[in-house]
Amino acid sequence: GSGAGKAPEDNGDAMSGNPYAELVSRLRAAWLSGKTRPMEYRLAQLEGLGRFLDEKKQDILEATTADMRKATQLDSAFIRKDPYGVVLIIGPWNYPINLLLVPLIGAIAAGNCVVMKPSEITRNVERLVAEMLPRYLDEDCFAVVTAGVEETTRLLENKFDYIFFTGSPSVGRIVMTAAAKHLTPVTLELGGKNPCYVCDSCNVQNTARRVAWGRFFNAGQTCVAPDYVLCSAEMQEKLLPALREAITEFYGPNPRESPDFGRIVGDRQFQRVQALLHSGHTAIGGQTDAEERYIAPTVLVEVQQDDPIMQEEIFGPILPILTVASVDDAIAFINARERPLVLYVFSSRKEVMKRVLERTSSGGFCANDTIMHMTIPSLPFGGIGMPIPRNGVLREPPQPAEPSTGRVLPGPGGILPRTLPALPSPTAPYPQ
Ligand code: NAD
């Protein structure tokens, strides 16, 4: 049956008429209220569960015997770590070496065979990896496939034992659908919009430097970049001159001439990011040069939440600032959207930090800095899914705007011909 109460919008339109929609909405509203988080609450619920097992023990035994004549005895248990088997790693273009090789290290260390599929967009790195890397690895177990969309679609028809994908959420959905046909487990490292809440109590200069560094590093093409700033109108006034100062300090008076400021990866990506400059009002930067695929470090103000720049991951050197009235406003803004890969908060007040941390949900959380949490090897890294589709409707993956740029190098199935010297076979064929 379904519960009482009004269905919140996020489980709305697409599910109207579904008999369980109201129930799921009621539980989602309870989740968003933060009720399930305090330790005492969780203990009380577990104690309730324990009482159920104690008080109804006889009924449970009778019911399981009636159903299946079930009897259990205590066994000893242990965990044995096994490699998956044949693994597929699909990489994006923004850190094309790192995001292909870091998963590869884990896969090799565990004892898997690996097919690597670098991004076709960064074609120089793709070629380098395809031509050179196999010379350093056992060709029986490791292969590089160079493929665009069409060829990757064919590659994904094959059964793999694990797929590690890094890229956009829309392609992640395609990869997961292909994996589901074979019940292949996946890791999807995706992107999204990472909010950055700047509290009135923060150190303005430090905040501006750290936000500017995180946003404009790699010309904004970083999955963990702060995507937009939420702050009060008063803080925005203080932040703007500090951001301008930080940008000049990092990239000089003309960032186009700076050896430290990057370019957008391709023409199609340039057109997409450039179009986002029309949201709000340009407070800093805004200059572009299509030939060089240059977009100046830019800060936009007076941005509204339904402006185009707030509908997709920016993935370029543009920082929109949206004003909010309070920390609770910022929390509500964040919770009305997809769960971010990382959430940034700048504040000198512990209670503000704690409030945001306790009332939001994100893959990572980083206080008073940007990106640096990724550099701490003892911390895990990852996102936590996108369980609140906007307007209750999943977005369709965009259709490719132009034919696939993928090329298949000669050789069976797009796999490079192995005329290169092979490494000696590993002595132990299977890890002990
Ligand atoms: P993308 O999804 O367009 O491409 C990623 C890979 O998928 C590429 O190798 C590409 O060839 C392949 N691909 C593209 N379309 C496909 C299709 N229809 N079928 C099968 N394969 C297809 O992503 P991108 O533009 O290369 O990278 C940018 C995205 O990656 C951003 O969203 C960014 O946030 C995200 N990202 C996430 C992380 C993370 O660790 N979470 C790290 C870096 C980048």
Image (cartoon, rainbow, N blue to C red):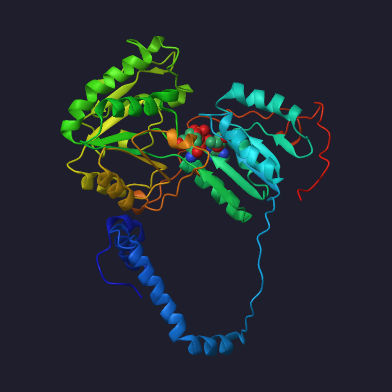
- To which quarter of the image does residue 96 belong? top right
Q: In which quarter of the image is residue 343?
A: top left
Q: In the rendered view, would you say 28 is above or below 400? A: below
Number of marks present in the image shown: 0
Residue depicted at x 44% and y 16%: 260
The image shows residue 314 at horizontal and vertical percentages of: 37, 32
Report if residue 431 is visible in the image: yes
- Vertical placement of residue 376 versus 69, above or below: above
Residue 320 screen position, x and y as percent = 28, 30
Q: Where is residue 346 in the image (x, y as percent from the top left)?
A: 29, 36
Relative to 160, is 213 on the left or the right? left
Q: Which residue is painted at 63% across and 44% down in the image?
A: 156
Residue 392 screen position, x and y as percent:
35, 54
Left or right: where 232 falls relative to 161:
left
**Image-based side of 62 in relation to 332, left or right:** right
**In the image, residue 217 above or below residue 28:** above
Question: Camera-side residue: 376 or 412?
Answer: 376
Quarter of the figure that contains the N terminus: bottom left
Residue nearest the viewer, comparing 89 with 411 = 89
Quadrant in which residue 236 is drawn: top left
Residue 394 or residue 230, whichever sits in front: 230
Whether residue 311 is visible: no
Q: Residue at x 46, y 42 (%)?
A: 169
Q: Who's the residue at 41% across and 80% down the image?
A: 51
